[in-house]
Image (spheres, rainbow, N blue to C red):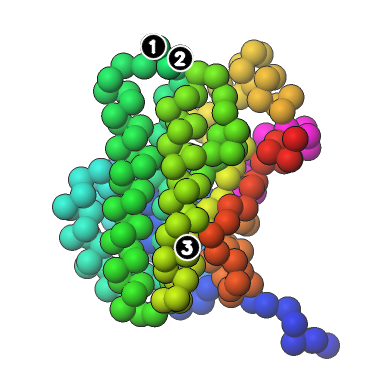
Amino acid sequence: MTSGFLPSMRVDGQVAVVTGAGRGIGAGCAVGLAEAGAHVLAVARTAADLDATVAQVRELGGSAEAVVCDVTDTAAMRRTFEGFGRIDILVNNAGMGIAGGLLDYADDDVRRMIDLNCTSAVFVAQAAARTMLTQGSGVIINLSSTFGKNGRPRHTVYSASKHFIEGFTKSAAVEFAPHGIRVVAIGPTAIDTPMTHDRLRDPLVGADLLARIPMGRFGQVVDCVGAVVFLASPAAALITGTTIMVDGGWTAQ
């Protein structure tokens, strides 16, 4: 028996572009969106990583293609996105973090983080939005962080880049709402991935992070995937300009 009020979290027949899809959260989102019915265009710089993501999608019966592209190469990225033809969902995930005191950051480290986390995120969203405008629909999902809400020592530039994503998400959402395009974000806490696993097990770093999470555990990739698939789906049709925090209560304090 159905009431007619249960919205679908399926995205059957839609085209989803996921950047940074070779590993971690990006790979998980690519697999999850494919499981929810999307055809996934998995974008990253490293072919071997993408091949692993696409293989996992296909093992589960989903549909995906590997697209080798460095999103910091703006001209190449724009050509690649123009070739997609249709984009219903963008997961704007590519990013990086380098820990360090503000006075200790090397010039190149600052520029690399801002270039990837901010500048490239804008240009990727811009390229996807151009396609979405011709369709009159679409959703852009940006990756923020708990550090996009709070500050943290030795993460000044990374935190600044995620605060940038928060403002970008809100303003872009207001701009594109009349055109049927939603712009949202997720804000993960420390997520246990192959890249972060050892750091999270560090007695000092890991213990400090864990102490800030009321639910008492680190996030898993699947926690982020659930939020992304929900935001991409018809179930989130009236949600735009906001961030879904996937942080175990960190930013509630």
**At numbered mark 1, what does the secondary structure look like: helix, strand or loop?**
helix
**Mark toward the viewer: 1 or 3:** 3
Residue on which the image places disc 1: 104
Residue beneath the point at 21% across and 49% down: 74
Which residues are the magenta region?
A: 213-224
Q: Which residue is mark 2?
A: 101
Q: What whole-number distance in Å separates the C-alpha atoms at marks 1 and 3?
A: 36 Å
Q: Is residue 39 visible?
A: no
The amino acid at mark 2 is: Gly
Residue 93 falls left or right of residue 147: left
- Looking at the image, residue 8 lies above or below residue 25: below
Q: Nearer the viewer, mark 3 or mark 2?
A: 3
Check disc 2: other Cα within 10 Å, few if <14, some if 14-19, many if 20+. Answer: few
Image quadrant assignment for residue 23: top left
Q: Residues within 10 Å of mark 3 (few under 14, many from 20)?
A: many
Q: Position of residue 246 (x, y in %)?
A: 65, 46
Q: Is residue 101 visible?
A: yes
Q: Would residue 127 appear left or right of 153 to someone viewing this image?
A: left
Of the residues shown, which amino acid type is indicated by label 3?
Answer: Ala
Q: Are marks 1 and 2 in contact (CB under 8 Å)?
A: yes
As drawn, the label of residue 173 is: 3
Q: Mark 3 falls on what kind of element?
A: helix
Marks 3 and 2, how far apart at CA: 33 Å
Crowding at label 1, few (<14), some or many (≥20) Cα neighbours within 10 Å? few
Q: Looking at the picture, how far across and down is residue 215, in whole percent?
A: 78, 37
Task: Judge whether residue 45 is colored magenta.
Answer: no
Q: Tell which circle, 1 or 3, labels the residue nearer the N-terminal end.
A: 1
Q: CA distance from mark 1 to mark 2?
A: 5 Å
Picture coordinates of residue 40, whole percent (x, y): 41, 64
Identity of the amino acid at label 1? Asp
Determine whether the residue tagged by mark 2 lies in a helix, strand or loop.
Answer: loop
Where is the N terminus found, in terms of image quarters?
Answer: bottom right
